[in-house]
Image: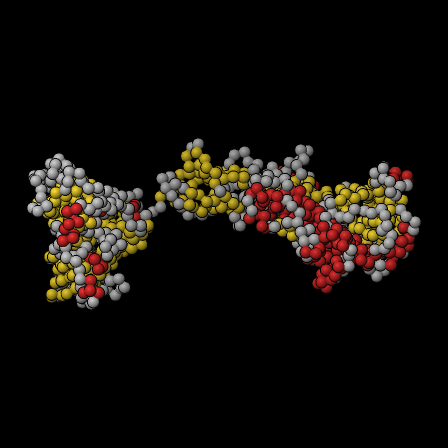
Amino acid sequence: MAKLLRRLPLLLLFLPSCQLARAQAARFDLAGPKIDIRVTRAGKTLPIAYVPNFQPGDKIWLHPDLPPTQSVHYLLICAFLRGTTNPPPDNWFTKIETWNHTVTEEGVSVVVPDEAQQVILFLAPETGGDFTTLKKAVRGRPGIFVRASQDLAEAGFEQARIEKYVASMRQVPPSDAKALADHSTLLARTLNLKPNDDCFKRSVDLQYNCLTQSGNQTLLDDGHAQSVIASLSNGPNSDFITAASYTGMAGGGSYSAYVGAVVDLFRILGGLHSAQYQYIPAISSPEKEALNLRLNTPPSFRNPKSVIVIGLPSVQKSVPPPLRPSNPNLVTCLLKPKVVLPLEGAPLVFSTSYAHDLVLHLNTKATAADIPLVPDAYQGGLIINRNPDRKPLPTPTETEAAQAQAAETQKDAPKPDIQQTTPGTPTITGTVSGSWGFDSFIGPTVPLQNIPGANWRLASDDPLIAGHENHVLLASNGNACVESVSLESSPGSSTDIKWKAAEHANIVELNLTLKAEDPGKLQIAVHQFGADSPAIVGAKTFAEPATLTALEFHAGDTSLSATGKNLFQVQQISMADVTFTPVPQEDGVPRTPGSLELVLPASAAAPKLKVGEKINASIALKDGRNLVLSVTVAAARPNVTLLSRNMGRPADSVLRLGDEDDLPTTQKLTFSLKSSSAFPRTGKIEIANADETLHTELSLATGTLVLQNPHTILATFDAFKSFGTSAFGPLRLRAIVPDGTTDGLPGAWLPLATLVRLPTLTNLLCPAEAAAPCTLTGTDLYLLDSVASDEAFTSPTSVPEGFVASTLSVPRPAGLPTNLSANRPATTTLYVRLRDDANSKNSATIPVLPIPSTPPAIGSEPPQVRKQKDAQPKPDVSVSQR
């Protein structure tokens, strides 16, 4: 086969250029003549579309169906072949003059001789010696025509599969992407082909056109079609045809059915082309008794005249279709309005009419009519042909009655090999059977369900938790007939639930998403085909219980910490005759997930428990449930108290801070601590803000801690060095002592200071008019929250967020003289609130300078300020450089 593929380009080179162009197109889209064919075997006659193979002794009735106005006389020649190396005898050729009145009225019958293996037809224009010439060509090189017959039959099979796919896909709404994907999958499975995956990567409006174009499918090897053709060559033909379809010189975009016939055309043209005749292949498309022909080359009636070559089914034993269930464990419900038996493995069942009179036989002891089946590749299997006159399916009660009657009347009859149906069990089996051509065949046996499932219940005792997605399993004695599942949480309220049949028999999987506020009883309704009312499964939902994984209590503490889930349900925790209650949640401050802090009442003393002592704690939940958890008393936390602080204040600032807890970021803080126990030399003092986004540690090793004695600690904290220019807000501290862990054992947090950033206030420029406002000059004025002329902040001036100017209009301070002079500057006091600590009041004593009646524009620099700057000494540049 590989050798033949390597020779394909060489064959193409020997073709005339006009024939090469036609061969590369290889589109069999020209309607050719039509021949009516019927086959009779053992007194039974079938149309050619129902016959997958011939047998010796078959009578083949041939009737050329040419138009009455046919001006060129065609000679129809029927030839039987018996292999590549054994030329057929003369009497295996039958000459049929299509213009003969008897032929047009009655047709001609031929009988398949013994030892025949192939049947091939020729349609040739009438010329002198045409019959003899064709007979010599066949007898001289029979192998060419044997192979041509096989390849044409294979091409016809493949063409039928692809055309069935394309025609079926055209039934799908073009805008429904899911339906396009679903039906493409079903068709690909039944027809054994692979659609172009790139089609599904396109937009929905382009998927339809892509999927319904011939050439966008890849045919997979179909062993059954190979058996029907009875290929005599080495290697399967479909491998060669499929491989050839991908060669650029053989068409490129044409699918393999056409390319296979093109390959035959190359061989015939290369081996049999003469001055009188050229041979062109025809792909047959049978429809009942009509054999419709398609050509890829227009016939020529001048020399060389065109001889149409037609392949018919092989002469061989019948090869029944190897149908098999796509999922052997899938149970099919016979009560559905549209029943599909998902079968695969035999594409010719779905793309041809070879399989006919298909039925489903129910394997029960009760007498029931066989159910007609119809192949439907669009639905992905065999569908039940609904017949209003068909008897209803037997119920289990009828089955038991029929079994009892049969037992009385046929006690001595041989026992049939059929399924023993358990009373009340809805699952039975059915066997597919039918005819394949003239021969009957028995197909696969599939599991079926003929009554709705009963005894629906929850398959597990796992509780349903409100506020969560719950994976629920429902069990019954049959789940194939489930139509839908709904949730009824209250009367008149119904919600559809997504469900699927589980891999385990008679189990249905549900995903229930229950709202957190809906604990209580609910009902799951299972709607089934054939059932008058849904099956109801009762269930109860619960709020998720609190789960405590650990309690942490340190000796001497008045608080404890709990970790776990759903801790909001904890009402209180009691141990050692004291009761801890949760710390009240602050407005707008969420709790830390998975943890809960509990404290004793302010008047209660810490329980006297020793380190290492184990004690049981009783946890009371808000819904009345109680939990018990063991607690081991941990070592006492380090305990320090703040003795004194020395807050640095900038000497060059006119601001006087009103809150002793405010610490300017540019100043160092020195403070002392008292430890209740000896402070270890490896201990640390941690300083952080409330959310711990700012964090630093002081230690003896870094020189930021000094021990005055084992219990007294002196600390130095440089905020600017530790946190930079963007640090502000309250700071707190705690002691950390080593306990064998990486982080150490921390103590309780203590407030330390409030970090503030200070603006620079330079002057207050005021006009002579007593009612006119003044202008405050300086830098970093955005650090101000508001400015007032009195301590009560009667009429403050607010500083907007994002303020970037260096001047600010403020109210004129009370009592400020109007006769201001640049030679005799006055001073005044303004009151300000800082943006980093807007709750404290601060004062600023600054010089007041006169300005003209019309104040300078905001952001400009008054002349007095420029004069002061000019009077300042200039730096020695040379010294700076040195």
- The residue depicted at 78 percent of the width and 55 percent of the height is 16
* Relative side of 473 to 174, left or right: left
Task: Pick whichever, 37 or 825, lies toward us.
Answer: 825
Of the 4 image quadrants, the one containing the N terminus is bottom right
Q: Residue at x 62, y 49 (%)?
A: 195
Q: Quadrant of the C terminus?
A: bottom left
Q: Is residue 276 visible?
A: yes
Figure quadrant of residue 718: bottom left
Residue 598 horizontal side relative to residue 89, left or right: left
275 or 110: nearer the viewer: 275
Residue 17 x %, y %: 76, 54
Please say if 236 is above or below 408. Answer: below
Q: Quadrant of residue 249?
A: bottom right
Query: How far across and how far down the image is residue 271, in percent?
Result: 82, 58
* Spot occupied by residue 466 in the image (x, y as percentages of width and height): 38, 43
Residue found at x 85% / y 46%: 301
Q: Is residue 180 above or below residue 651?
A: above
In the image: residue 182, left or right of residue 40 = left
Residue 578 x/y as whole percent: 19, 50
**Observer-nearest residue: 15 or 693?**
15
**Number of labelled discs?**
0
Q: Nearer the viewer, residue 127 or 377?
A: 127
Which residue lies at the image location 76% right of the left edge and 44% below the top edge?
30
The residue lying furthest to the right in this view is 128
Q: How is the image coloured?
A: secondary structure
Q: Is residue 785 above or below residue 722?
A: above
Question: Can residue 325 be seen in this snapshot?
Answer: no
